[in-house]
Image (tube, rainbow, N blue to C red):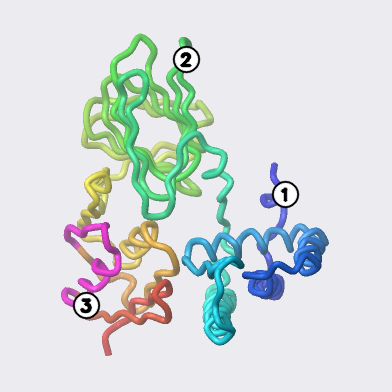
């Protein structure tokens, strides 16, 4: 188990310290300052965790300032530094629970055989003739040899089109295992459960406990925990539409819809409680989530509030 998984999320105070260290070091070639920062990071595991998360946030927001090799006048450099510090500090204060103290696991992406970043979708032809599609922020390990065809979903969501081979295709999540031959299915791993949606053919689904197994047919969706398999009677979203760059909803709660859109964009996307239960049906393109969000006030009595480009709250129209 990594050190990051053994400690609590960093406190707001430590996050602020990490931000200030990062901004002081930005564009600086001061060796003593770098050593001082390394000393601070080494004092506590919490310090290093905050540092890594601030660095990740900085990369995702695209706030990287010009390197030391570029010459900027002091006024412009100072303004850029203040703007970046203001945004990062705002995230630490107003959105710490979402931004910097959330339970993110970048190591899954870094160590996986195949992974996608936020907003990225990727396809791969496997050695056995099967096809694998990864949705946003997903990671898999692939174990194919003479004895097995195994895909381990470590994070996120995949669509698998399995080819017929003497050995069945197996896909494993934290909660379950799927076995398939000549089937097309979507598998999504959440924190408490995984969801299987079969698009073509049939597959066998078993919880990780191994207490039971069930054959799932095309058109069916099931949620599975470590011990329980439960059918989803009326899914509010079309499984696998993301492969075509779409979200297709059916009477979906607005709060759930925004949580789904949030998977494809950097930053914080929040929904006011007063409108959380409003319903939404439609087809939405994922190639530009800002344009997608701009459609909402045309169909619902809501308005968008941008604190920054990456911090959006959908509220009831006054």
Does the magenta portion include 243?
A: no
Where 182 falls versus 146 (above or below)? below
Q: Residue 3 carries which label?
A: 1
The image shows residue 146 at horizontal and vertical percentages of 46, 10
The residue stretch that appears in magenta: 281-299
Where 58 falls versus 192 (above or below)? below
Which numbered disc flags the more N-terminal residue, 3 or 1? Answer: 1
For the residues bearing labels 2 and 1, Cβ distance under 8 angstroms: no
Q: Nearer the viewer, residue 280 or 121?
A: 121
Where 9 falls versus 271 (above or below)? above
Q: Can residue 207 be seen in this view?
A: no
Quadrant containing the C terminus in the rendered view: bottom left
Return the residue at label 3: 297
- At label 3, counting other C-alpha atoms closer than 10 Å, the crowd grade (few under 14, some 14-19, many 20 or more) is some
For the residues bearing labels 3 and 1, Cβ distance under 8 angstroms: no
Does the magenta portion include 298?
A: yes
Seen in the image, is 29 located left or right of residue 131? Answer: right
Return the residue at label 2: 145
How far is mark 2 from mark 1, CA to CA?
A: 33 Å
The image shows residue 264 at horizontal and vertical percentages of 36, 57
Which numbered disc flags the more N-terminal residue, 2 or 1? Answer: 1
How far is mark 3 from mark 1, CA to CA?
A: 44 Å
Seen in the image, is 242 located left or right of residue 265? Answer: left
SS category of the residue bearing label 1: helix
SS category of the residue bearing label 2: loop
Seen in the image, is 233 located left or right of residue 177? Answer: left
**Number of marks:** 3
Name which residue lies at 30% across and 38% down.
Answer: 197
Q: Which of 281 and 142 is in front in this view?
A: 142
SS category of the residue bearing label 3: helix
The image shows residue 244 at horizontal and vertical percentages of 22, 46
Q: Which mark is residue 218?
A: none
């Amino acid at each position: 188990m990594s050190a990051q998984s053994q400690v609590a999320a960093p406190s707001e105070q430590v996050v602020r310290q990490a931000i200030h260290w990062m901004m002081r070091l930005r564009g600086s070639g001061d060796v003593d300052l770098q050593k001082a920062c390394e000393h601070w990071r080494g004092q506590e595991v919490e310090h290093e965790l905050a540092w890594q998360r601030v660095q990740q946030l900085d990369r995702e927001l695209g706030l990287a300032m010009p390197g030391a090799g570029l010459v900027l006048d002091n006024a412009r450099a100072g303004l850029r530094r203040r703007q970046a510090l203001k945004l990062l500090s705002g995230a630490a204060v107003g959105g710490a629970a979402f931004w910097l103290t959330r339970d993110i696991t970048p190591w899954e992406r870094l160590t996986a055989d195949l992974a996608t970043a936020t907003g990225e979708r990727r396809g791969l032809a496997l050695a056995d003739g099967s096809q694998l599609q990864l949705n946003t922020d997903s990671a898999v390990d692939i174990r194919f040899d003479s004895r097995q065809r195994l895909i381990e979903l470590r994070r996120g969501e995949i669509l698998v089109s399995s080819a017929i081979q003497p050995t069945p295709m197996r896909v494993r999540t934290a909660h379950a295992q799927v076995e398939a031959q000549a089937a097309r299915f979507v598998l999504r791993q959440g924190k408490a459960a995984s969801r299987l949606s079969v698009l073509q053919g049939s597959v066998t689904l078993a919880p990780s406990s191994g207490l039971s197994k069930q054959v799932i047919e095309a058109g069916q969706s099931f949620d599975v925990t470590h011990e329980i398999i439960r059918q989803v009677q009326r899914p509010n979203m079309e499984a696998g539409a993301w492969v075509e760059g779409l979200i297709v909803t059916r009477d979906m709660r607005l709060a759930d819809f925004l949580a789904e859109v949030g998977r494809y964009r950097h930053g914080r996307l929040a929904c006011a409680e007063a409108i959380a239960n409003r319903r939404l049906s439609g087809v939405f393109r994922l190639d530009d989530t800002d344009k997608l969000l701009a459609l909402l006030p045309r169909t619902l009595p809501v308005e968008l509030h941008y604190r920054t480009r990456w911090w959006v709250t959908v509220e009831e129209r006054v």
